[in-house]
Image (cartoon, coloured by chain):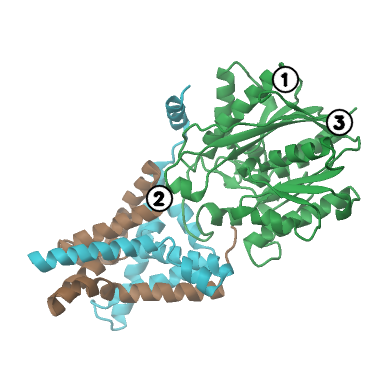
Amino acid sequence: MRDALLEFSKTFLKAECSTVGKKEYEGPLSDYFDSWEKDEYFGCRSFDEAESEMSRRNINFLLSKARYSYGDIDVICGGDLLNQCVATSFAASGTGIPYFGLYGACSTIAEAFICSALFIETGGAHNAVGFASSHFCSAERQYRFPLEYGSTRTPTAQNTVTGSGAYLFTSDRCGVRVKNALIGRIIDKEITDANNMGAAMAGAAADTVLRYRAASKDEMDSFDYIITGDLGREGHEIAAELLRRQGFTAGSRFVDCGMLIYDAEKQDVHSGGSGAGCMSSVLGAYFISRMRRGEIKRILAVGTGALLNPNSVLQKKTIPAVAHAVCFERED
Amino acid sequence: MDNKQYGEYVKSREKRSPIVKNCFNAFITGGTICLAGELLAFGYESAGASAEDAPLYVLLTLILLSGVFTGIGFYDKIAKFGGGGALVPITGFANAMAASATESRTEGLVNGTAVNLYRIAGPVIVFGTSASVIYGVIYYFFGG
Amino acid sequence: MRFLRAFLIGGALCVPAQILIDKTKLMNSRILTGYVVLGVILGGAGIYGAFADFAGSGAYVPLFGFGNTLAKGVKEAIDSDGAIGILTGGLTGAAAGITAATFLSVLWSLIFKSRQK
């Protein structure tokens, strides 16, 4: 049971929407995002409010794309990186939609996919929204130092993405369907360096991909892309190596949202992007949209999360990690 | 690959920071800040300050300037280039306080700014005063 | 000459911090506490004074100088007031710097706003 895939038969992805910050918009994927904001405060007083505002706008945009209103949505679930998930709660407040707050660090969006799909499969919802966000400035406050403080970072460090991605799932047959999913288990490679989260998450990503491969009876070749969330260059190369040692070589089909969102040469982002907003904004904007245009057929989205908090780092604890896999497929 | 081997593998492939270049930048940055201090000292002395008092005026001026540079978002750029060269001078200390104070303003002047003001700079004062007390005890009982 | 000395010595004193940053992943605050405590020791041992005369701001602008100020304050207070100077001397010596940095930081928080670069 625990190593079997969660098979979905009636969950479809009706629409997706991504809103990002200035730095993300200046990256190579600028043409794909639905909207962006140059003000890091999003017109609000604090960075925490800004993150909620970003998600709120993005959800409204998502619903307007699908010509839905709040009243059409049966459940909304999502998460972010702030203490007690407040950015998400404020974003969903006022919508009147039954709400579930999730936390899986940067893997949150994969949790939201699986959660939404389960609601729809069980008949608990006709329409469900899943979303996740992160904001560079609020995450820096949460995990590191004040913005204006002159601190230096190592080459393996990653840059938190300012972005929010929202996805509208429905039981009405349409363009893209959620085929199956595999819930990851916690993998702790005993990495303690919070500036190398890629290495901490690579083990979890590899574990989930290998378990998925075993459970799917080697359907791996049919994927156009196997997409990890935010391993960054460092973590992605390590994960590829771990997979290779287990006899699985994905080659150029194995990509990472954290590497795609920024231009590593021109933008000062060290190992790449990270954060709950990374996969959530890139997957829909870049991959699902190409799926809808018929350029690709099947993808495996592997959301990766490093489950640390600032105190656990100071206590010199290791960084446990988790990765959840979700398969999206175009309906023909 | 067990976790120990994994840790070694991860370490072995980590890109190293360009330490020689970083040290050079730190040297230039720290040196420039101290040079600025010396120019200020020269200025204050020319204006009539005693050689005894000038250093204090210099430090206060640097604390002021560092705060302004922090506020306009320039000090962290200096630090990005200079690393330790921007950290060690008194300006780095002032930067840590100004940055913590400014960012925490959203939680209020008392519970935000005041509570978090020493978040980064606090340990310097805690260990500095503690060390000075230990030194004082030694000096008092055993003479200097 | 005094300018060159300040530049060279001040710059050189920052290099060990950079080596620690790159080699040990030590957090900034640990490095700075190390500098201050070392400053107290050097000041207390009486080495710092002659060095500061030679290097000028190259010696007192880096955080060693802050440590030295604390040690010097304690020494002077003990000399004039006796044992109570152990407790009063350090912060008395550093009072101007700490007060200025504290007050100004409150002021900055009222004037400036954090920005992403």
Tag 1's secondary structure?
A: loop
Note whether residue A26 is visible.
no
Circle 1 residue:
A216
Q: Residues within 10 Å of mark 3 (few under 14, many from 20)?
A: few
User: What color does chain B have in the rendering?
Assistant: cyan
The image quadrant of residue B91 is bottom left
Residue for point 77% across, 37% down: A118
Amino acid type, label 3: Gly
Q: Residues within 10 Å of mark 2 (few under 14, many from 20)?
A: few
User: What color does chain C have in the rendering?
Assistant: brown
Side (left or right) of C99 relative to A151: left
Q: Are marks 3 and 1 in contact (CB under 8 Å)?
A: no
Residue for point 45% across, 39% down: A192
Query: Which chain gets the green colouring?
Result: A
Note whether residue A73 is visible.
yes
Q: Relative to residue A103, is residue A176 depicted above or below? A: above
Q: What label sits on residue C27 in the rendered view?
A: 2
Circle 3 residue:
A294
Closer to the eye: label 3 or 2: 2
Q: Are marks 3 and 2 in contact (CB under 8 Å)?
A: no
Tag 2's secondary structure?
A: loop
In percent of width and height, residue A141 lies at: 55, 57
**Distance of mark 3 from mark 1, alpha carbons?**
24 Å
Depth check, front residue: A172 or A126: A126
Amino acid type, label 1: Ser
